Image (cartoon, helix red, strand yellow):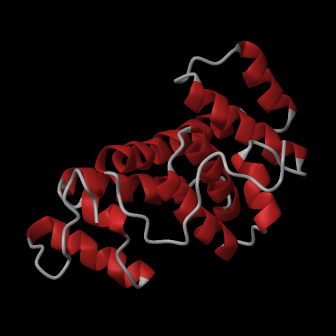
Amino acid sequence: MSTRIETLNPETTTGKSKELFDAVQNKLGFIPNLIKVFGNSPATLQSYLTLGELTGSGNFSNKFREQLALAIAEENSCNYCLSAHTAIGKMNGLTDEQTELNRQGRSADAKVEAGLQLAQSITRNRGNISTEEIQAAKEAGYNDGDILEVVLNVVSNTLTNYVNHIAETEVDFPSVEAGKFTVNS
């Protein structure tokens, strides 16, 4: 299922990884291939799951976190995460058109668009963004805490994007490819 890092079999996995797999199975009803790859390092898997809990406890809605995940995955060209977050985004109310716009850092909602563009710039520039970009986010309605939560979402999603690139994780969601849009910029 992964060509470069083993995709663990939950039936034969033991120890801390098995415990974490069971928790994911109970929460989602299945264990995505990304989790099976993460299981090679229980510390990394637990860090990823903890980051997910922390982003979920922040100020942003599930829908907006999915929009951020789509924008970040597109910026990082991560087909696995684009596929997963397209499916999860639909469960959180995103339409196909919104999904494609969000991947491009766009939205009909000006505040959402400002957040997506901030996340993509943070990702693209490895955090080295301009004072003007921070000011634009603030003018759109984001406060300092919100800007830091955008960074947290970038970190969490970049972790999964990079692991998927390194592992070449097999996509186990309906496939979506970076850079392929029907809604144009």
Pick the front one: 181 or 39? 181
Rendered image quadrant of residue 57: bottom right
Q: Quadrant of the N terminus?
A: bottom left
Q: Is residue 61 visible?
A: yes
Q: Is residue 57 visible?
A: no
Pick the front one: 143 or 62? 62
Rendered image quadrant of residue 129: top right
Determine the residue positioned at 65% across, 28% down.
121
The spot of residue 166 in percent (x, y) is: 31, 44
**In the rendered view, does 95 fall on the left or right side of 178?**
right
Determine the residue positioned at 79% across, 22% down.
135
Determine the residue positioned at 14% across, 66% down.
16
Q: Quadrant of the C terminus?
A: top right
**In the rendered view, does 164 fall on the left or right side of 97?**
left
**In the rendered view, does 172 fall on the left or right side of 163?**
right
The spot of residue 4 in percent (x, y) is: 23, 50
The spot of residue 101 in percent (x, y) is: 79, 51
Rendered image quadrant of residue 3: bottom left
Determine the residue positioned at 19% across, 59% down.
6
Q: Looking at the image, is 25 positioned above or below residue 151?
A: below
Q: How many marks?
A: 0
Q: Looking at the image, is 65 positioned above or below residue 35?
A: above
Q: Looking at the image, is 134 positioned above or below residue 142?
A: above
